[in-house]
Amino acid sequence: MGRRINQRVDQVSIGDISSVVAGDGLSGGGATGAVSLALDVNELTVVTGDTADYISIEDVTDNTTKKCLISDVVTAGDVTGVTAGTNIGVSSPTGPVPTVSLSIDAAVDIGVDGTGVDVSFHTGAAGDLMLWDASDKALEFTDSKITMGDNLIETPEFIDYAETLNAIGGTGGGTQDIDITLGNVVSATVDTSTNTFTFSNPSITGKSCSFTLYLTNGGSQTVNWPATVDWSGGTAPTLTASGLDVIAFTTLDAGGTWYGFAAGLDMQ
């Protein structure tokens, strides 16, 4: 009996693997020659990883495959560098926390000519949008105004517009300045004693600058005007002691000469 068992064991031959079939998540395999298998990530099931889960990595120091916690691989950090793309410049591009100020240094087309496209610019409550020309700020949008910086608006059409009123109130005697930057429509009441008006901050030479003064009780006290005012007919108008006068002023040379005339006296 023992001899028969030994004979059967001796008859078992040692051979080669005839084929290798790739399982889930693998590709490759074969039935002849050298056979290789490769990880096929497209065949793997998609799951949401947790920091306590493991992933497999290759240890290049000894060419072995090992496992590693996701929490040891995924870490939160700072952006340490920013690279500018085509026609875009970046200031302070390096970290650990870069200060990024993007500047577009070439023409940018938005949409396709003739088809139309909406463009929206959004800023924070305190943010401004500024457009610059070659020399200086050309246009500034804030929450409540558009600052043109003495630049041109060409062929506009306006409807239902208003002008800013610089309401001075009582002049109180002495010197009263009319600052054009505070409004091109001015109202004031002469009271107390002699009043001397001065005009400041007109537009630059070569641009027309005008303002309209609504003056109440101008004839109740002595009123002195700037020596640079040339009056219609060569004489300042006689103002109303108790009532409203409307007087207009305009200059073409930054206030070197103001042209003054009564638009209406003793308005009732």
Image (spheres, rainbow, N blue to C red):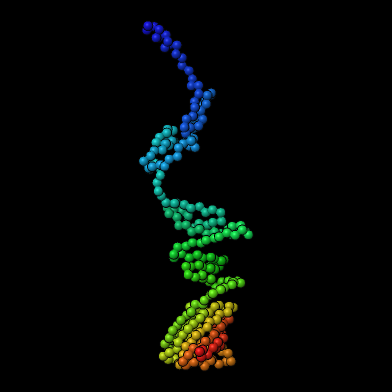
User: Which part of the image, by quadrant, shows the N terminus?
Assistant: top left
Which quadrant of the structure image shows residue 58?
top left
Taking 182 as reference, is 1 above or below it?
above
Inspect this view and state whether residue 222 appears: no
Taking 49 as reference, is 5 above or below it?
above
Which quadrant of the structure image shows residue 260?
bottom right
Measuring 51% from the left and 91% from the top, which residue is drawn there?
A: 266
Residue 212 image position (x, y, % from top left): 52, 83
Measuring 56% from the left and 56% from the top, which residue is drawn there?
A: 87
Taking 214 as reference, is 26 above or below it?
above
Residue 150 image position (x, y, % from top left): 55, 73
Which quadrant of the structure image shows residue 114?
bottom right
Inspect this view and state whether residue 77 appears: yes
Measuring 46% from the left and 92% from the top, which residue is drawn there?
A: 242
Q: Give whichever of 266, 258 is nearer the camera.
A: 266
Taking 73 as reference, is 168 above or below it?
below
Residue 94 image position (x, y, % from top left): 46, 53
Residue 108 image position (x, y, % from top left): 58, 58
Q: Give whichever of 37, 241 is nearer the camera.
A: 241
